[in-house]
Image: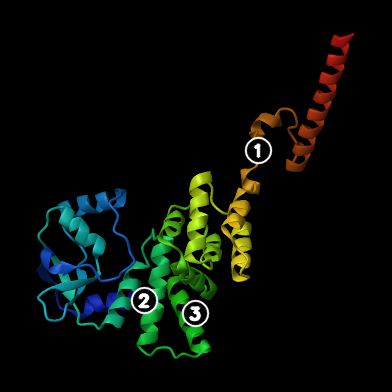
Amino acid sequence: MQDTRKEVDKMKNTMKKPVAIPVEKLRPFAGHPFKVRDDDEMNTLIESIQTQGILSPLIVRPIENTDEYEVISGHRRLHAAQKAGITEVSALIYVLDRDAAVIAVVDSNLHREHILPSEKAFAYKLKRDAMAHQGRTSPQLGEKTLTVEKIGAEAGDSKNQVLRYIRLTHLIPELLDLMDEGKIALMVGEALSYLGDKEQYAVLEQCEMNDCTPSYAQAVEMKKRYLGGQLTTDNISEILSREKANQRETIKIPTEKLRKYAPNADAKQLEDFILKACEYYRKFLIRQRNRDER
């Protein structure tokens, strides 16, 4: 991530000073994947801007044949400024083509502390496509692999992790939302992304009807069946209706409650102790019942 941050910092340092631009002249970057959310972090940012102003200028580029600008870096700051009632913001202006602007948008946002899976997925895809369009890659597989490795190295992810995220762009929006909510894991989402839209909506319907989400094993099975031309709506219903290991009823007993009965036992010994105690109590109940029946 350091290389990309250096590029953004370099852009900030090449202008002598920022200029004031009316907020009505600023437009979000077309097609950027990063969501601007009205959450606690945004409220904190609004309060900061109200008291201290915008400490770091936005980075923008001119929109051709207009007097308006497209935001490269600073979408959250712009939104907070608008919420705070500020009418002008300071910005650094750079003339960039679409591909260079895409890369700058991605690089300036991937460093954020909280980034959603859907944001990272489309950001990686945008950057890969922009780099390819710029001529940084050729159609050859080896060159494409090097590009993905470079993107991953700059963002702190492996090549395979970058490819997994890019694969998520094939998910329907509703399943992507479940990923953003933390209800579907990355590997599960990747497997589901190989299903067609019709099958993905069938999965979504089952999730909503049964208040469940697929396990990794279930997702992989559906992927294999789909790629083999054997996945039907009935298959999906049957697969998702199976009991998952994490759905089986369990009983949890705090360790400190057991220590007074077996203070020096390790975890395995505690488990054996509980099972033997249960067996002893079961036999006690049988003897008591037999006495009562006499």
Q: Nearer the viewer, mark 2 or mark 3?
A: 3
Numbered disc 1: secondary structure: loop
Left or right, 208 with reference to 15: right
| Amino acid type assigned to the residue bearing label 2 in the image | Thr
Q: Which comes sooner in the sequence, label 3 or label 1?
A: 3
Distance Cα–Cα, label 3 vs label 1: 43 Å
Q: Nearer the viewer, mark 3 or mark 1?
A: 1
- The answer to whether the residues at label 3 and label 1 have Cβ atoms under 8 Å apart is no
Numbered disc 3: secondary structure: helix
Which labelled disc corresponds to residue 108? Answer: none
Percent across and percent down for residue 178 are 45, 54
Q: Nearer the viewer, mark 1 or mark 2?
A: 1
Percent across and percent down for residue 56 are 22, 65
Distance Cα–Cα, label 2 vs label 3: 14 Å
Which labelled disc corresponds to residue 149? Answer: 3
Specify whether residue 163 is in view.
yes
- The answer to whether the residues at label 1 and label 2 have Cβ atoms under 8 Å apart is no
Q: Quadrant of the C terminus?
A: top right
Percent across and percent down for residue 79 are 21, 58
Locate residue 262: give its quadrant: top right
Percent across and percent down for residue 98 are 27, 81
Q: Which comes sooner in the sequence, label 1 or label 2?
A: 2
Q: Which residue is mark 1?
A: 250
Q: Which residue is mark 2?
A: 4
